[in-house]
Amino acid sequence: MTEYRRAYVPGASWFFTVNLAERKGNHLLTDKIDLLREAFEYTKSRHPFRMDAVVVMPDHLHCIWTLPPNDADFPLRWSMLKGYFSRNIENRERISASRKSRRERGIWQRRFWEHLLRDQTDFNRHADYIHWNPVKHGWVERVRDWPYSSFHRYVEQGIYPENWGNDERLDIIDGIEYLE
């Protein structure tokens, strides 16, 4: 089995990308947004973290979490969140022989992308990337039009103007390349 190297830094902030196993034409995350919110709350109530930024797309999501001091166990949190969501979805997905042998569902990709945020500039760039994502993927023309995003909270807090991303150049967004 492949062994992945992950940095574990207690109390750190992390950028994550988490994908559905079958992405093409799949709108499960937005169709089941209330269940996904419930899965986040379930996980946070058992293993707290701060959700600093998030965007939920139909087939993947991006978020920034900050873990509590003395805690670096983000894999446990993702396992709980994915498990909660999966247990509450009807069994309609295609399940490979490999997943069947492990008694896994076929909803989520097994792995996820994580990036340890190094400083405030790194944090800001990733928050911008998160909030720009619905425009990047062509779901909306304006950032403010995507309902499943912490962008609206950022506007309420005065971090972004409501027209952010559409009335100014966002060269910074193009500087972040991730596999999606």
Image (cartoon, rainbow, N blue to C red):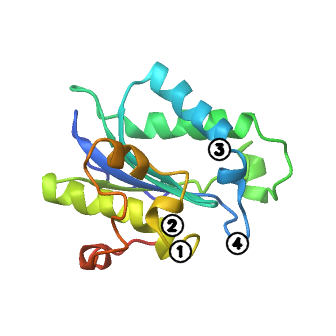
Q: Alpha-carbon distance for marks 2 and 3?
A: 15 Å
Q: Foreground mark, 4 or 1?
A: 1
Amino acid identity at mark 4: Lys
Q: Which mark is residue 51?
A: none
Q: Foreground mark, 4 or 2?
A: 2
Q: Alpha-carbon distance for marks 3 and 4?
A: 18 Å
Q: Which residue is mark 4?
A: 24
SS for dot 1: loop
Is any part of residue 155 visible from this angle?
yes
Q: Which residue is mark 1?
A: 137
Is any part of residue 180 visible from this angle?
no
Q: Residue 50, how many percent across, how many down?
A: 34, 33
Image side of residue 85 versus residue 71, left or right: right
Nearer the N terminus, badge 4 or badge 1? 4
Q: Which residue is mark 3?
A: 33
Q: Which residue is mark 2?
A: 134
Image side of residue 76 versus residue 69, left or right: right
Q: Alpha-carbon distance for marks 4 and 2?
A: 16 Å
Amino acid identity at mark 1: His
Nearer the N terminus, badge 4 or badge 2? 4
- Pointer 2 and pointer 1: residues touching (CB < 8 Å)? yes
Q: Residue 135, how many percent across, how many down?
A: 48, 72
Q: Residue 137, how many percent across, how many down?
A: 53, 74
